[in-house]
Amino acid sequence: MRERILDSENGGVPLTEINTLVIGSGAAGLNAAVQLHRQGVEDVLILTEGLNKGTSINTGSDKQTYYKLSLCGDESDSPKSMARDFFNGGGMHGDLALVEASGSVRAFSHLVQLGVPFPQDAFGQFIGYKTDHDPRRRATSVGPYTSREMCLALIREVKRMQIPVRENLTVVELAVAGEDGGRRAAGAIAVDSEGKFHAFLADNIIFATGGPGGLYEASVYPSVHTGGIGLALLAGAKARNLPDSQYGLASTKFRWNVSGTYMQALPRFISTNREGEDRREFLREYCESPGEMNSLVFLKGYQWPFDPRKINGSSLIDLLVYLETVEKSRRVWLDYRTDPNDLSFAQLSDEAREYLEKSGATQATPLARLQHMNPGAVELYREHGIDLSSEIMEIAVCGQHNNGGLAGNRWYESENISHLFPVGEVNGSHGVYRPGGAALNAGQVGGFRAAEYIAHRHAKPSAGISLLENALRESLCNVFSWREKCRLSPHDWRQECKEFRQRMSRAGAQIRSEKLLRQAVAEAREQWRRLGTEGCRAENAAEWAEVFTTRQLCYAHLVYLEALLFFVASGVGSRGSALTLHETGEPLHRLLGQNWKAKKEDESFREKVLETVFADGDFRHEWIQRRPLPETESWFETDWAVYREGRVYD
Ligand SMILES: Cc1cc2nc3c(=O)[nH]c(=O)nc-3n(C[C@H](O)[C@H](O)[C@H](O)COP(=O)(O)OP(=O)(O)OC[C@H]3O[C@@H](n4cnc5c(N)ncnc54)[C@H](O)[C@@H]3O)c2cc1C
């Protein structure tokens, strides 16, 4: 690592030169840095908003899941079998499925080695359970905070290895240079909490900025996490499967999925006007009987993500919450203090009644049932300032995870910007459906792959300093020229964020229609144009990070909406965690109007992958045939030779 001053038209800026810059310190970025070090690439710097920022260290769920190859009992499992299950989710490239399956044991064992307390039995077997889209028992967990435990263990390792970390820095622009007719990463510009700008010249960038948490108004990503995909999109990086995301019910004051026992306790769902008045139980009229309504709420407990295939079942609840909160602009709350009107255990479905009876959860109130089944669930909210015994709790259908993201190859290098390695949630390796816990696995495997490739192919400087430096200067110019516009701007960045977040939750989340999206895209283009020409203002130096984050998020929301419009107009229909409305579709419910008809999924699209890239002045979207699962011969002598000669990196 070398420090100097970079002269630019706007004066000198501190410059750090480094072989590999890791942007982001979530579970994925931290592991990538550790693996680089293990591979002998020691000229590494982690640059981050903060070690306590991002999704991994700030989030969790009832039983936060890590997905890995089965390592217990006599159930057979293999990389190919796990890869097939990833692949069968649709929309995922076969080679990436095999890579994420093959890397699973290595990534998991590494975490165990670092002290993450994944449960074992008395014989050392890593016991597992079944998660969603999982035909075996490959899932494991250390409790509600699996990803936090992973981060804490990885941070200890980063410190032990003395890998330098620069905190309180927000990257505002990626620098990209032209090389050999293509493009390559050159570095990044960041701003600190005092509004000072810093330049980083890097041969390689591991881009681990997480999912697009800052795009939605209704979001269960931690509020400190906005994500940075817009930076790479602004730099022209190719994206994949942006429309495939997961949405579900979550509390909004303290962001947490209300899955599992939160639903099985059968709380009362009420809606109010914006001021919190005019309380109504709104689910009942859409159900034949109180028994049906409460049975659907119960099922929601273990069918957490919104799923258009379950609209006649538990996902009706998400749909009705969306109607209240978005269409009717009301607010929705859970009340654990009193039972839903006319609750009768005798009227529940056999499944719900038997479960509650067997669990001894037949107490007189939802709170008492929740307390009985899962006391920690009540305590968790108390710790975060919500007392379920004395108040109602606001919820919404929230964005939780993006299966899509940037397009990387099987070594996690961007498909169109070399030396840029998106890893973690920002890498769109997943397809339509993925097993619960596959996100954490993918983030770890990505770090191993990228580090190994860098160590074998990019460890030495591969471009002239001047090429990279010129690209950095150009980026600085962009940054400073937009900053000048912002100085005079009448627009408040908070308002700008509110505008695109509301638009995304209305038109770009789990309920989609071509009409809504056309309008949303037009509005998004206008907002992006206005932000580009008029900027938005920082009230003080510390707000420059927010102002620039608003810029990349606004661009990201435009790209997502453009991709969503193309996706819907292509006729993909309802799939994954999103419902597409169409006039020729199936009516959703007798009480919903004519507009509420769902377009069925055209499953042929599961054999394709949607790519989005900005090129020649416009967005280009293209459905490409996905790559099949590789047929590997796995003959030791020949594969060994390929490995020895380094041809695995070709
Ligand atoms: C409520 C919830 C429950 C979940 N449950 C599960 C589960 O059970 N199983 C599972 O597999 N997955 C789950 N996920 C998803 C999983 O937690 C995330 O995909 C994963 O933690 C993302 O890790 P990451 O390292 O990619 O990103 P993050 O942990 O989000 O880290 C991103 C890092 O980048 C930094 N950063 C971002 N932008 C910038 C910038 N401009 N400049 C500098 N730094 C920047 C951030 O500060 C942070 O350090 C869940 C997610 C949520 C929200």
Image (cartoon, rainbow, N blue to C red):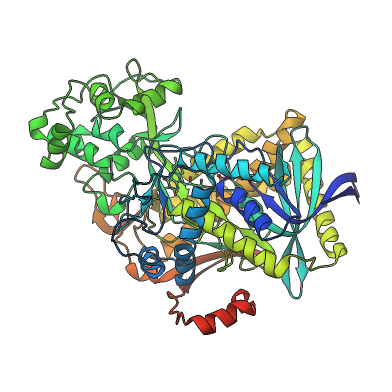
From the top left corner, tell me how far across and down residue 76 is, in percent: 31, 65
Residue lying at 43% horizontally and 70% vertically, measured from the top left: 608
Q: Is residue 443 above or below residue 181?
A: above
From the top left corner, tell me how far across and down residue 21 is, in percent: 72, 53
Q: In this view, does 368 lie to the left or right of 436?
A: left
Q: Residue furthest front?
A: 123
Q: In this view, does 570 lie above or below 550?
A: below
Q: Which residue lies furthest to the top in this view?
A: 390
From the top left corner, tell me how far across and down residue 250 is, in percent: 39, 36
Foreground pick, 25 / 152: 152
> Is any atom of residue 216 visible in this view?
no
Q: In this view, does 268 lie to the left or right of 244?
A: left
Q: Which residue lies furthest to the left in this view?
A: 346
Q: In this view, does 331 lie to the left or right of 622?
A: left
> Within the image, what quadrant is residue 294 found in?
top left
Foreground pick, 224 / 535: 224
Q: In this view, does 440 lie to the left or right of 388?
A: right
Q: In this view, does 452 lie above or below 56?
A: below
Instruction: Give the total of numbered labels.
Output: 0
> Is any atom of residue 134 visible in this view?
yes
Q: Which image quadrant: the C terminus? A: bottom right
Q: In this view, does 59 lie above or below 645?
A: above
From the top left corner, tell me how far across and down residue 126 is, in percent: 37, 51
